[in-house]
């Protein structure tokens, strides 16, 4: 009788050993498979010949034209315009008040801000021309700002903000940081 019990125990032990080896071998994790499942992925969309309209409070504020666009969904959703862009800005009566062009732009959706670089130029309807190597456009505030040297050329003014500036979207109000250049002063000590 003990012989039968010892055979049953031996057989059960062998079966348990075989099954445990199977489970140990089948639980082996391939590092490549784990990496593929856990690595971060950035989803990208691409579009050509873009014409986009921006509105605020139900009124159209800007029209963007670009030959190429890339939109990325990562931690922060952003859109790149790597092959130039042009934007027309509209006033309350739907007239173009200013326009800008740049060789590169990057729009951050969550912040409603656009980073512009490479030959950034903003021109208002009076012909005042603002140029910089880098510029930010804040859609909510309807302002441009930069900490890079920025130049304003107009009829009677040629002003350089050596450490950037802040300007309204229509270029009617501009505050330069460390300005240089010839310009006329009004009685209240502000440039004309």
Image: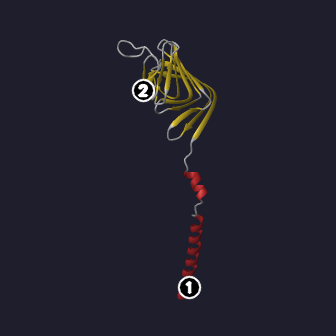
Looking at the rendered structure, the secondary structure element under dot 1 is helix
Asked whether residue 79 appears in the rendered view, the answer is yes
Q: Mark 1 points at which residue?
A: 4
Looking at the rendered structure, the secondary structure element under dot 2 is loop
Q: Which of marks 2 and 1 is nearer the N terminus?
A: 1
Query: Percent position (x, y) of residue 160?
Result: 48, 23
Query: Percent position (x, y) of residue 47?
Result: 63, 31
Asked which colour scheme the image uses, the reply is secondary structure
Asked whether residue 1 appears in the rendered view, the answer is no
In this view, the mark in front (2 or 1): 2
Measure the C-alpha gap from mark 2 to mark 1: 100 Å
Q: Mark 2 points at which residue?
A: 178
Nearer to us in this view, 117 or 51: 117
Nearer to us in this view, 69 or 97: 97
Crowdedness of circle 1 by 10 Å Cα count: few (<14), some, many (20+)? Answer: few
Query: Percent position (x, y) of residue 126?
Result: 51, 12
Q: Do the residues labelled 2 and 1 touch (CB within 8 Å)?
A: no
Give the image quarter of residue 53: top right
Crowdedness of circle 2 by 10 Å Cα count: few (<14), some, many (20+)? Answer: few
Compared to 41, does 94 lie above or below?
above
Q: Which residue is drawn at 38% across and 12% down?
A: 186
Query: From the image, which quarter does the C terminus lie in?
Result: top left
Compared to 85, does 127 lie above or below?
above
Q: Does residue 62 appear left or right of residue 177 in this picture?
A: right
Compared to 30, does 9 lie above or below?
below
Q: Which residue is drawn at 46% across and 32% down?
A: 111
């Amino acid at each position: 009788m003990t012989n039968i019990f010892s055979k049953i125990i031996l057989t059960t032990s062998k079966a348990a050993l075989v099954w445990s080896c199977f489970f140990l071998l089948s639980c082996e994790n391939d590092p490549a498979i784990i990496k593929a499942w856990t690595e971060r992925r950035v989803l990208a969309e691409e579009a050509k010949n873009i014409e986009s309209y921006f509105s605020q409070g139900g009124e159209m504020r800007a029209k963007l034209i670009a030959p190429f666009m890339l939109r990325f969904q990562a931690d922060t959703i952003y859109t790149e315009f790597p092959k130039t862009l042009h934007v027309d800005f509209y006033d309350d009566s739907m007239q173009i008040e200013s326009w800008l062009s740049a060789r590169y732009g990057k729009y951050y959706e969550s912040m409603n801000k656009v980073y512009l670089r490479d030959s950034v130029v903003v021109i208002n309807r009076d012909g005042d021309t603002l140029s910089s190597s880098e510029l930010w456009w804040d859609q909510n505030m309807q302002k441009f700002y930069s900490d890079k040297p920025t130049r304003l050329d107009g009829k009677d003014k040629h002003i350089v903000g050596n450490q950037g500036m802040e300007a309204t979207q229509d270029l009617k109000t501009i505050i330069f940081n460390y300005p240089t250049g010839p310009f006329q002063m009004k009685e209240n000590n502000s440039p004309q």
